[in-house]
Image (cartoon, rainbow, N blue to C red):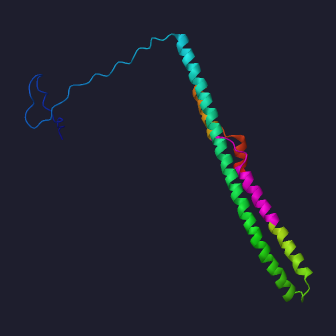
Amino acid sequence: MPETPPPQTPPPPPAGTTPPAGTPPTPPPIPPPEPPRDERSLADLVVEVSERGSTLVREEIELAKAEVSEKVGKLLRGSVVGIAAGVFAFLALILVMEGIAWLLNEEVFDGKTWPGFFIEAAAFLLIAALAGLLAYKALKAGSPPVPQQAIEEAKLTKETLTGEPGAATAPIPSTQQEDQK
């Protein structure tokens, strides 16, 4: 089968003439802008790099501060709400347990009052141990408030400046241990 040549477009009209009716006008080509020439000396460039480096370090420190304060704020809010919930649950539990103790005294121990209260005290201690364990796990999950974003950003900056590939991919030891738990 013979190859068919690609369709040819008509050549553009000569300059100064109008294109035929029905064809859109073609804009003249725009030359790319020339990059500005930097006339600064080497000393000026070194000073600028130094200033930008110190700005970068200051911004990294600000990111770390913001991240730590955000995590501390979350821990404080969670702790306050947990304490308030615990107080109200404790007050309600006192009333429920008092009622159960009197019910045990009447139904199980034939009117003797002391065995029901000791059973209730043992139940209280069991609940307190469980609540303490849950509080320990919750506080451990939120601490230490390590600024993860700032650390990752610093590693990426180090990799960019030193040219060491993989410097930013090494895991942070403290979070690696926490993730395994």
Rendered residue at 72%/48% (across/down): 143
Q: Is residue 179 left or right of residue 39?
A: right
Residue 155 belongs to the span the image colors magenta: no
Where residue 135 appears, x then y in whole percent? 76, 58
Magenta stretch bounds: 128-148
Q: Is residue 2 left or right of residue 43?
A: left
Residue 141 belongs to the span the image colors magenta: yes
Could you say which quadrant of the image residue 107 lies in?
Answer: bottom right
Magenta: main secondary structure: helix
Viewer-closest of 53 and 87: 87
Rendered residue at 79%/73% (across/down): 94
Where residue 164 appears, x then y in whole percent? 61, 28
Q: Is residue 13 visible?
A: yes
Rendered residue at 90%/88% (across/down): 111
Q: Is residue 5 above or below residue 41?
A: below
Viewer-closest of 107 and 126: 107
Could you say which quadrant of the image residue 173 lies in?
Answer: top right
The N terminus sits in image quarter: top left
